[in-house]
Image (spheres, rainbow, N blue to C red):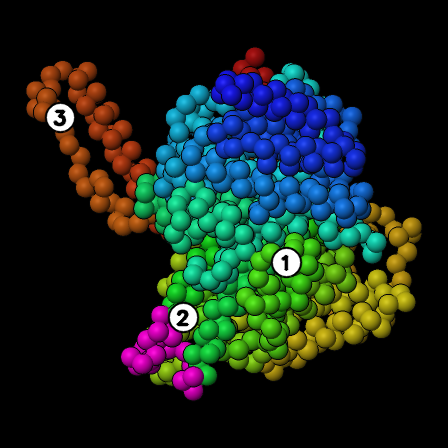
Amino acid sequence: MNPYSFTVDSLSKSQDLAAAILASSTPSQISAACSSLDAFLRSHSPDQSRHFFSLAFPALICKLYGFDDASPSPPPPPPSSSSGGGGWIDVVFHSNDADLAARVFDLLSPDGVLFHLISAVDRQSLVKYVFPTERLPEWARLVLSADKDCQGLNALCPVFQGKVREGGSSKGSSSSSSSYQIQLNVFEYFVYWFAYYPICKANSENSSGAMMSATKSKTVSKLENWASSIPRLSHAKRGNEQKLECNLYVRLLYAYLRAFVPVQGMDTHQPYRSSLLHYGYGGDGGSSMMRAEFFVDTLVHYWLVDNDFSPLPVNLCKSVGLSFSLRSVLGETPPSSSLGEVVKLLVKYLNCSARVAQEVVGRVENANGGRFSPSSFDMKSGELVASVYKSSELVGSWNLCIQRPLYRFILRTFLFCPMGTSLKNASQVFSVWVMYMEPWKIAMDDFLELDTNVGSSGIDMNKKVGQSRQCGYQSSWEGYVLSNYLYYSSLIMHFIGFAHKFLHTDPVVIAEMVLKVITVLTSNKELINLIKNVDKVFHTKQAGSGKAMLSSLYKYVPLIRDQLQDWEDGLCESDADGSYLHENWNRDLRLFSDAEDGGQQLLQLFLLRAESELQANSGVNFSQNLELIESLKEQVSCLFGCYAMRSISFTPEKKQLAEHTRDDIFTPRKLGNHTFADVKYKGDWMKRPVSADEVAWLANWFVCLSCWLNETLGLDRAENGDVSSKWSYVEVSSYSANIDGPTETMKTMLHAICSWLLILGATVIGLMRKHGIRVNLRPLALKKVITVLLLSALFSVVKKGVRMFLRA
C-alpha cells in the first residue's frame, strides 16, 4: 500500500478523533472517546502517530483538564464548545461513576497504551512541543520574560535542563515577548500540564472576579478563559458517598509517583518498569533516576516554589553568578491555595524513602548492638554498609529536593496569610508540616486504599514501607531530624507568630494547632533531648562542653546556620504582620530562649491570650475549652521543664456583640492589671502602626520616603571592612600648579570642597551601614513637631508683616 495513503488516513482519523474528544462533555461521550482513542492508538505505529500528537493529543489535554481552548501547539484543533460541564476529571468526579473513572484511568495510566506510544515516540524524537511561557511557574515565567540568565536555568534546575532554547515566543502567547522558549518531548509536555492543572484551578478561585472582567482583547480573553473554566481541584467536600476511585487526579498522581519515583534502590523491581524503563534516556538505572528527578522537580516547582521570590538556593545562585531580582515583583505573595491534598500525598510518598532507609539503619544498629556509625564497622559488614549508603543516597536525593521548597512553602503560607480569610488552607498546610515532622508514623495503611484503586500491576507499598507502624521516634531517625532541624525549631517560632496573629479568628482551631505541634516535640524524651542539645551547642562554643554527645553535634551547627540563612532568605514577620521576630530573623534560633522574644515568653503570652479568648467565647463547650487549655499548659511545661503558668482569675462573660461598637469589640481584653497593648512591639519600629500623636497620612508619606532613601543609599545592607579604606587620599589634578587668576583659583577651591564633601558623605553613609543606622523621617510627622513648625512659620509671617507695617 502507498505510504501516502497511510499519511492521509492518519491525518483524517486524527482530525475526527480530535473533534470527538472536544465534543465529549457527558459520561457516555467521554466513554466513547476513550474507546476511540484506545482503538486508534493500538492500530497505529509510532511513525504513523505524528498527526495524532499534533491534533488529537492537544485536544485530549484541553478536554481532560477543562480548558476552553486547546494548547497553543501547532496546529491547534478546532475550538471546543464551552457549554460542556467542565473537563473529564471534573465530570468523572461529579458523576461518581466508578466504571467511567476506570475507563479514563486505564487510558492515562503509566502502563496504558497511550504511555507505551509516548515512550516509543520519545525514543525516536519524532515530536517536540513548545510550552507556553505564561503557563510556567511564576518565577520561571518572570526570568524568561526578562531575557536574563535564562541559560542558567539549564544548569540549575532538572525541570529545565536542556529545555531552554533561543527562539521566538510560543504561538498563542500574547503575554510573553521573550527570545527564549521551552521545548519539550511528549512525556515532558504531559507532565508539565499535569503539574500546572491544580495551580491553575487554585488561582482561578482567587481571581475569578478579575477574570470575568479581563476581556480587553480576544487573545487575552482566550488565555484567561483557560483558568476561569477550570473548577476547583478539591471540588466540594467529599461526602461519605463519594468514591475515592472517582477522584481521578489523585489516583493518577499516585500512579505516576509509583511508576516514575522509586522509594527503594534502583535495582529493585518497580511497577510499570517494563513499559517506561527505556523512556527518553536509555535503559540504565541512571536514566530512570533522571526521569524520577524530572517528575519530582516539576511538581516541586509548580506546587511549592511557583511564586517564591527566592526559588533556588542562595549559595547555588552565587556560585554560577545568577541573581534573580524577583522580590520587588512577587513581594509578599502567598502560595497558591487548595494544594494541601496533592502536596500532602507527594510529601508522604517521598518520605517513604526515609522510612526505608531508617529500617536499614535500624537493622544495622541491631546487628552491631549500638548506634549506627559508619566508622564502627569492620570489613565483614562492608556489603551491609554499602547498602545503607546506597539507600541513604537515594533518600537524600528526595529529601534534599523538597527540604528548602517545602520549608519556604509552609513559612510563606504562615507569614503571608491574608487577614480575614478562612483558616482552611493554613490548616491543610499545617497538616503537611506535622506529617513531615513525623515520618516514623508513615505506614502501608496510609496507601492501602490508593493501592487498591490504582491496581495490582505493581508491588504493594507495604513491601516497600514495611508491614507495621512504628510507635514513635527512635534513635535511627536522628539523622533525619538533624538534617531537617529548622522544621523542629525556627519554623515553630514563626508559627507561634502566626498563632498570635490569627488567634481571634478561631481560638479553638489555633489552640489545637499549637497543641499538636508542641505534642510532636514532647512525644518522645529522646527526641526533645536531641532538639534541646542542638539548640544548646548552637549557642555555645565548641570548647565549652566536654560531653561526648554534645561534641558530636557541633558538626551540624554550620549546616543549620547555612540553612537558616538560605531557607529564610528574604522572609521575616516585620513586613508581613509587624510581629515578634524581626530583630533576630534569619540569624538565630529562639525557641528555647528565655528572652522576651523567645519561645517560652511568646508561648506564655499565647496561653494567656488563648485562655482569655476561650473563656470569653465559651458556652456549652466551656469544659472542653478548659481541658484544651490545661493540655496546652501541660505540654508547654513538658517542653520547657519546670514551668509554672499563672491562671487568669476572672469569670467568663458571654459575648453580646449587639451591645458593643466595632471599636469596643476589637479593644484588647485585660489580663489582670495588664493589656495586650502593653506588649512591646518587636517589628520594624519605623513601620509600627500609626499612633494617636502622629498625623497618619504624613507618617505614611515619611515612612515611604525613608524606605526609598535607605534603599537608594544602600543603608538596608551591612558594610564590610573599613569604610575609610576606599578613599585614602584626594588626587589633585596636574594643572593645579599653573593656576592663574582668581577665577581658576575659585574653581579649584570649589572642586576641592565638593570632593571633600563627597568623601565626607560617603564616609558617613559607610559608617551608617556599618553600625546599622538608617534614615527615619517619621518623627517629623509627630503632632508636636508639626505644631512647632506651624507656630514658627506663623511667627515669622507675623514678624515680617509687622516690619512692613512699621516701615509704611
The amino acid beneath tag 3 is: Ser
Q: Which residue does the numbered mark 3 point to in the structure image?
A: 733
Q: Position of residue 186 (x, y in %)?
A: 51, 35
Question: Which residues fall within the magenta stretch?
Answer: 367-386
Within 10 Å of the Cα at label 2, are there few (<14), some (14-19), or many (20+) other Cα atoms? many
- Amino acid beneath label 2: Val
Residue 191 location (% of width, % of height): 54, 41
- Is 215 displayed left or right of 317 in the figure? right
Q: Residue 132, relative to residue 153: is it above or below?
A: above
Residue at the outermost bottom position: 369
Foreground label between 2 and 3: 2
Camera sees residue 66: no
Q: Closer to the camera, 57 or 129? A: 57
Q: For this rendering, which residue is in front, 778 or 223?
A: 223
Callout 1: SS: loop
Of 48 and 67, the residue lying toward us: 48
Instruction: State which mark lies toward you, 3 or 1.
Output: 1
- Residue indicated by mark 1: 456
Q: Earlier in the sequence, mark 3 or mark 1?
A: 1
**Mark 3 to mark 1 CA distance (whole Å):** 86 Å
Residue located 70% across and 26% down the image: 20
Q: Main secondary structure of the magenta part?
A: helix
